[in-house]
Amino acid sequence: MAKVLLIEDDTSVAQALMLGLRRLDHEVEHLPDGNRDLLEPVRRNEILVLDLGLPGRDGFDICRTVAAQHELPILVLTARSDDIDVVASLEAGADDYVTKPVSPRVLDARIKALLRRAARAGEEPVTQPRAVSRIGDLEVDEDTMEVRRSGAVLDLTPTELRMMVVFARNANRVLSRDELFERVWGSDFRGDSRVVDTTMQRLRAKVEADPRNPSCLLTVRGFGYRLSPGRGPQPT
């Protein structure tokens, strides 16, 4: 059983999902939009199920705000199935997505999968500080989960941060799209590896001095991506 915060403006959809999830032993708190203080509702619940097409404050803005300030998983519920909207929601901080219409049982399975993933992450023992990895003038700090350029913190999304950590832990190795997909998004995610290329484009725009001619995050045609050889991270 999970405590679920559902933000959905369509009354009939919300009622059907609440009824189905409650029959599956979940507690569900419903809000019809995000035009209010979400601090307490977010604190009371274990997972956020968020519709993107909300009146007023849109779902992307809510997703970014909640992901930046809280640790609960975010499952996006949307009628949009285009890759660009799916990727945009993930880059805004969502952990997974489902497209409407969705049955309560499918939603239940996704909720349980996200909570299992969150539980595994919370059980990792912290025995010593993690390394700060350096790539040219970049630093990947796993303790603070920050990427810095010349000491200034870059504004990366959670997905972009996870990708930089994966690269930092695999200096100079070629990582295939499927491998990056598995390590960054996880086996519970129901998308496909095409999101890797879109995320790489956005990451390069923030990390590279010249995104059109990257010197750090390189494409290895036919294989995947790697950090630039000779400039790989050096643990401090």
Image: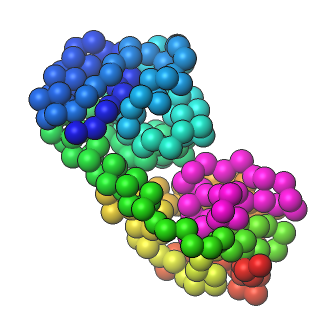
- Residue 25: where, in percent of width, then height? 16, 34
Is 222 covered by the magenta stretch? no
- Residue 220: where, in percent of width, then height? 58, 79
- Residue 189: where, in percent of width, then height? 35, 55
Count of numbered marks: 0
Q: Going by the image, does 114 lie left or right of 183?
A: left
- In which quadrant of the rendered view does residue 107 lie? top left
Can residue 83 be seen? no
Question: In this figure, which colouring scheme has been used for the structure?
Answer: rainbow
- In which quadrant of the rendered view does residue 199 lie? bottom right
- Residue 214: where, in percent of width, then height? 73, 68
Give the residue furthest to the front: 127
In the displayed structure, 131 sits above or below 160; it is below
Give the residue furthest to the right: 150
- In which quadrant of the rendered view does residue 186 lie? bottom left
In the displayed structure, 27 sits above or below 97; it is above
Q: Going by the image, does 117 lie left or right of 103?
A: right
Which quarter of the rendering shows the N terminus?
top left
Is 165 covered by the magenta stretch? yes
Q: Going by the image, does 130 lie left or right of 23?
A: right
In the displayed structure, 236 sits above or below 114; it is below
Residue drawn 22% across and 33% down?
26
Residue drawn 78% across and 53% down?
153
Residue drawn 19% across and 30% down?
21
Can residue 150 be seen? yes
Residue drawn 17% across and 27% down?
22
Q: Going by the image, does 156 lie left or right of 94?
A: right
Point out the stretch of residues depicted in magenta: 141-166
Nearer to me, 52 or 214: 52
